[in-house]
Image (cartoon, coloured by chain):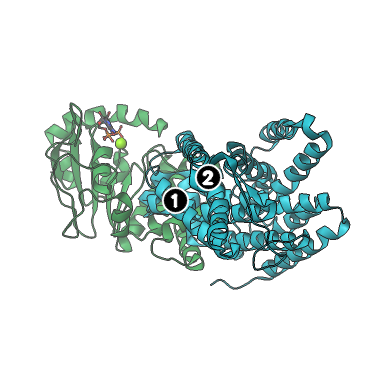
Chain colours: A cyan, B green
């Protein structure tokens, strides 16, 4: 285990501080809902990033794993009264297994071919769920109302949800940070740059790609369970829809794929925009958030193709001469502290 | 090795002895890189076997062969573009040193040896051709090969740079690594190679110490006569 540096401690404190302070600005349920969405999409973005950002596998099919998470815990709750916490873990593990099953046969695919395969998988999955009677098909499943308890992860108030989602996000970030600084993280990035070089240097690329896919799916499924518990109703349209896969990629791409805090920053920027736009325009504004997304993506692609955070970190890497810095993050940049502030201050 | 109707390597048998520098020369398209690909697991030979340290490694995956101590470089340099020079070398070092700090130390040692130290924080994509060539070698050294195979590591370098590369190769040999080197630059390979093998149109046409090779009739015809031509194409690498 690496020593815990001062920077890590400061980062954790800033994160916890921001999470605690953010909901205090307003008691309005909608404001707090937006914060929770930032946490949820932050988690989804961080999960995608392990695959897309570090390993260069641009999956446009993560909605399937979100769905697996949502359905696994919900079915376990509905059919057997199992606590969603256990359901969450089971959903994560199941998603990881499925991800391995998908990653293995697609391990020869690269770039756009991999992206297409991931999409095909997720769309097939949605069709399956829509036609599967055991899980109520297209009708969907309302979650049974439970008393307001932690055991069943159901609350009348938004604050417990806030704590849970940002706790899960914090764990995901820590895991990501640990991986990024370990051999696995270097291997992922080597694969992103060139699988040929990676294999010449002793990296079992197939195995590493499967590991990346499993980690990513695990956290995506966990987010799925959280969503089910938060909304208390799931159907294939809401938890396996293709648009969700795209939103996940957006969050990571806007903030900066391949950086630890990029996806969190992306969620902190995009979620308020889409949520408030939807609320302001009501039914008439359906899809307006997607139009706004489109504009943002175009601007970012033109001005900062590596995402907002990716841009800063790359710049610093080039200037920095402190090669002995033991606390090197994934791109040897040091933008994380600002990012926490930036990410959560935005909300 | 056969590609459809083309026999890129045919009836090629030779040995590499521990500690030596073996040179591989031959005109463009002779099948040198193909031979490397077969040895390093990037191609599965259609016929024949590759033995390394007495074991049959034919058909093993490149990463397995690397773990056994046989590491290659690429003729067309391939820096890991979005990683720094230091990180590039660390990727190689992780094979032997799973801990990040150990891999970093090993990589820094290699960067000093290969003259890339001052560029350790540059991104792979920013390097000039000579530095890319150095990085190819440095990255492979990270994996601590027993047998290092270099595919035209000196092509496209200025005479001074070639001289530096030659010194580096000698240092690597002195540290106990065996080398098998494809090289078009005659002035570079002839003085350092213990032995030379010559490929022409996929076949092994000569084998021996450099002094004999330069006098071999078939080699002169097949290869040395084309020396100029060989030099010209190196800008593409
Ligand atoms: N993957 C492949 N598929 C089909 N043909 C190939 C393949 N790789 C190489 N060849 C052919 O095999 C022959 C030998 O190529 P190779 O690259 O091994 O030559 P070389 O000796 O390394 O040449 P150079 O000096 O130009 O690097 C060439 O005719 C080439 O076109
Ligand atoms: Mg070649």
Q: Nearer the viewer, residue B42 or A99?
A: A99
Q: Nearer the viewer, residue B88 or A173?
A: A173
- Tell me, yes or no, whether dots 1 and 2 are on the same chain: yes
Q: Position of residue A16 (x, y in %)?
A: 74, 65
Q: Is residue B236 above or below residue A191?
A: above
- In contact (CB < 8 Å): disc 1 and disc 2: yes
Residue A152: quadrant of the picture? bottom right
Under circle 2, the secondary element is: helix
Drawn side of residue A277 relative to residue A177, left or right:
right
Chain bearing mark 2: A
Q: Is residue B23 above or below residue B76?
A: below
Tell me the residue that label 2 is attached to: A64
- The 10 Å Cα crowd at callout 1, few under 14, some 14 to 19, many 20 or more, is some
Q: Which mark is residue A341?
A: none
- The 10 Å Cα crowd at callout 2, few under 14, some 14 to 19, many 20 or more, is many
Q: Is mark 1 within 8 Å of ligand 1?
A: no
Q: Position of residue A217 (x, y in %)?
A: 52, 52
Give the total number of marks visible in the rendering. Answer: 2
Q: Nearer the viewer, residue A115 or A132?
A: A132
Q: Which residue does the image show at 27% across and 47% down from the upper left?
A: B41
Tell me the residue that label 1 is attached to: A98
Residue B36: quadrant of the picture? top left
Is residue B116 at least partly visible in the picture? no
Drawn side of residue A25 relative to residue B74, left or right:
right
């Amino acid at each position: 285990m690496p020593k815990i540096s001062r920077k890590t401690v400061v980062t954790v404190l800033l994160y916890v501080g921001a999470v605690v302070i953010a909901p205090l600005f307003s008691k309005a349920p909608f404001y707090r809902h937006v914060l929770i969405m930032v946490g949820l999409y932050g988690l989804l973005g961080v999960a995608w990033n392990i695959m897309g950002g570090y390993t260069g596998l641009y999956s446009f099919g993560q909605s399937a794993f979100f769905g697996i998470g949502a359905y696994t815990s919900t079915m376990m709750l509905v059919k057997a009264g199992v606590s969603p916490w256990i359901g969450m873990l089971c959903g994560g593990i199941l998603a990881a297994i499925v991800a391995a099953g998908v990653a293995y046969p697609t391990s020869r695919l690269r770039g756009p071919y991999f992206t297409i395969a991931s999409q095909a998988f997720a769309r097939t999955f949605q069709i399956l769920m829509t036609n599967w009677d055991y899980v109520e098909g297209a009708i969907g499943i309302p979650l049974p109302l439970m008393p307001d308890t932690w055991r069943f992860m159901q609350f009348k108030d938004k604050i417990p949800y806030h704590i849970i989602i940002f706790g899960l996000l914090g764990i995901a970030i820590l895991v990501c940070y640990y991986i990024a600084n370990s051999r696995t993280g270097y291997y992922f990035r080597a694969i992103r740059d060139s699988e040929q070089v990676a294999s010449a240097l002793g990296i079992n690329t197939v195995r590493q790609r499967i590991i990346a896919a499993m980690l990513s799916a695990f956290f995506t499924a966990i987010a799925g369970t959280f969503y089910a518990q938060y909304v208390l109703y799931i159907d294939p349209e809401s938890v396996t829809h293709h648009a969700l896969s795209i939103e996940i990629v957006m969050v990571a791409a806007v903030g900066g794929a391949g950086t630890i805090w990029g996806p969190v920053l992306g969620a902190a920027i995009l979620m308020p925009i889409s949520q408030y736009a939807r609320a302001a325009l009501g039914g008439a504004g359906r899809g307006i958030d997607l139009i706004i997304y489109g504009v943002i993506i175009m601007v970012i692609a033109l001005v900062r193709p590596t995402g907002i955070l990716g841009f800063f970190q790359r710049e610093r890497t080039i200037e920095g001469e402190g090669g002995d810095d033991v606390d090197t993050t994934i791109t040897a940049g040091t933008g994380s502290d600002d990012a926490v502030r930036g990410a959560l201050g935005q909300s | 090795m056969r590609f459809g109707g083309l026999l890129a390597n045919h009836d090629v048998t030779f040995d590499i002895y521990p500690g030596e520098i073996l040179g591989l020369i031959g005109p463009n398209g002779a099948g040198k890189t193909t031979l490397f690909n077969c040895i390093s697991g990037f191609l599965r030979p259609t016929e024949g076997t590759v033995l390394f340290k007495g074991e049959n490694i034919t058909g093993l995956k490149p990463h397995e062969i690397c773990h056994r101590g046989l590491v290659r470089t690429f003729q067309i340099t391939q820096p890991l573009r979005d990683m720094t020079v230091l990180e590039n070398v660390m990727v190689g070092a992780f094979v032997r040193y799973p801990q990040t700090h150990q891999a970093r130390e090993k990589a820094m040692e290699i960067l000093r040896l290969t003259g890339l130290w001052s560029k350790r924080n540059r991104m792979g994509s920013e390097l000039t051709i000579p530095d890319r060539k150095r990085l190819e070698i440095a990255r492979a050294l990270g994996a601590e090969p027993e047998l290092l195979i270099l595919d035209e590591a000196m092509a496209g370098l200025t005479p001074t740079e070639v001289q530096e590369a030659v010194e580096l190769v000698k240092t690597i040999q002195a540290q106990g690594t065996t080398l098998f080197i494809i090289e078009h630059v005659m002035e570079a390979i002839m003085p350092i190679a213990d032995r030379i093998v010559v490929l022409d149109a996929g076949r092994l046409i000569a084998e021996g110490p450099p002094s004999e090779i330069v006098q071999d009739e078939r080699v002169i015809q097949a290869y040395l006569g084309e020396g100029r031509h060989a030099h010209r194409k190196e800008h593409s690498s």
